[in-house]
Image (cartoon, helix red, strand yellow):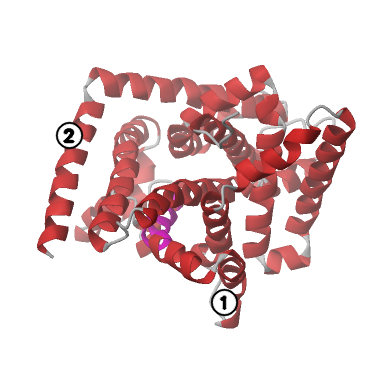
Amino acid sequence: MNIQFSKKDTNIVKGVAILAMLFHHCYVTEVSFKAHGVSFAPFSKGTVVSLALWSKVCVGIFVFLSAYGITLALKRLYDNGQYDRKNLSWASSRRVWKILAGFWPVFLLAVLGCALWAPDSFSVYGQGVSKILYVILDFLGLADLFGTPTLIGTWWYLSLAFVEILILPLLYLVYRRCGAFLTVLLSFFLPMALSLDMSELVRYLPAMALGVWFAQEDLFVKIFEWRLPHAGLSVTRIVEFLVLAVVLAGTVWLKSSEFGKAHTNITDSVTPLAVILFTWLFLAGIPVLRDVLAVFGKYSMNIFLLHNFIRARWFEDFSYSFRFWWLIVLVLLLDNFILSVGIEWLKKLLHYNTFVSKTENRLRAVTLERGNNG
């Protein structure tokens, strides 16, 4: 049996992450919903808000998955004796280009939407020559990295994604030289020892290290192989489910504890890993659910980039008009999913994907040629 953490498994986990992201942004602060008479039954408002705060686990999940995918590529280069500047430059450039190529159509749509429904949004860029610079940096996904204005706060993650792409080759080299234990340990405690501020990089560095570890050692496969002899025992499955459920409940407590608030780098690495394992071991085994999650995961980038415009910038009253907390999230998901499908259809119609592929080929030729000349 060929067991692997496949692309479909990745999309299933992304589907869970994007649901968590929508829930997080809908209820993490009362500013979002207090004027709309939302019903939180059968839970209290406080419980839903606490769960929404915990649901920022979505960021750590995406960071882990990115590190996992990048490491698989780096592993091939390293094992084939191609771990050099030329090939690393191309691998990093290709990933940055993929993100930008996916972001730019959404950026243009966001600009059009704001021009129609929220023209005041552009005031964030200010006036004069600096406005042009801020728009360019936002268009390149670098606003958060440079601390400049952005059209929507959600796009801060793009800067983290670029930084992750750039530092993963170094982190992977540390892993190959120092091993899993020391690399993961350093990712947690070296920033503390150096008294570094809890920046986004410091906060999610352990999640990156865990992604490297799981990819390098094929830990998903090993976990599956370990449990395979016991797969027919229902009592074993029940115990596994309960253990992971207790761990997940524990991460909810950890997130709201004083320790968790002071050490977000720990909570935002342990919690995503627990969610990923729970999703892969249990949710991915439910036939209809796994297919639905995989579809949402496939369009997760577009949903991530657009959902806060629909929820809070363009159609806030509509988004929160469905009264029940769960229905609001569901409708927001469907809105963004339909829009995302439309975006992908339009990209095909305009041959945008062909342009992306051709540009990628040109970038590859230029990058490798420079590497050879260097």
Image-based side of 83 in relation to 271, left or right: left
Image-based side of 105 in relation to 365, left or right: right
Q: Amino acid at mark 2?
A: Lys
- Between 106 and 240, the residue placed more toward the observer is 240
Q: Position of residue 108 (x, y in %)?
A: 29, 35
Q: Is residue 129 above or below residue 91?
A: below
- Between 159 and 277, the residue placed more toward the observer is 277
- Give the position of the C terminus as an image quadrant: bottom left
Mark-to-mark CA distance, 2 and 1: 42 Å
Which numbered marker is on residue 90? none
Outermost residue, right side = 235
Which secondary structure lies at badge 2? Answer: helix
The magenta stretch is 157-168
Occupied quadrant, residue 19: top right
Q: Position of residue 282 (x, y in %)?
A: 72, 32
Check residue 164 for magenta coloring. Answer: yes
User: Which residue is painted at 53% across and 67% down in the image?
Assistant: 202
> Mark 2 or mark 1, which has the lower sequence index?
1
Which numbered marker is on residue 358? 2
Which numbered marker is on residue 190? 1
Q: Position of residue 256 (x, y in %)?
A: 76, 57
Image-based side of 150 in relation to 281, left or right: left
**Neighbour class for label 1 at 10 Å: few (<14), some, many (≥20)?**
few
- Between 174 and 143, the residue placed more toward the observer is 174
Check residue 122 for magenta coloring. Answer: no
User: Which residue is painted at 32% across and 59% down in the image?
Assistant: 83
User: Which residue is painted at 90% across and 32% down in the image?
Assistant: 235
Residue 155, can we see it? no
Which secondary structure lies at badge 1? Answer: helix
Outermost residue, bottom side = 194
**Neighbour class for label 2 at 10 Å: few (<14), some, many (≥20)?**
few
User: Which residue is painted at 61% across and 48% down in the image?
Assistant: 219
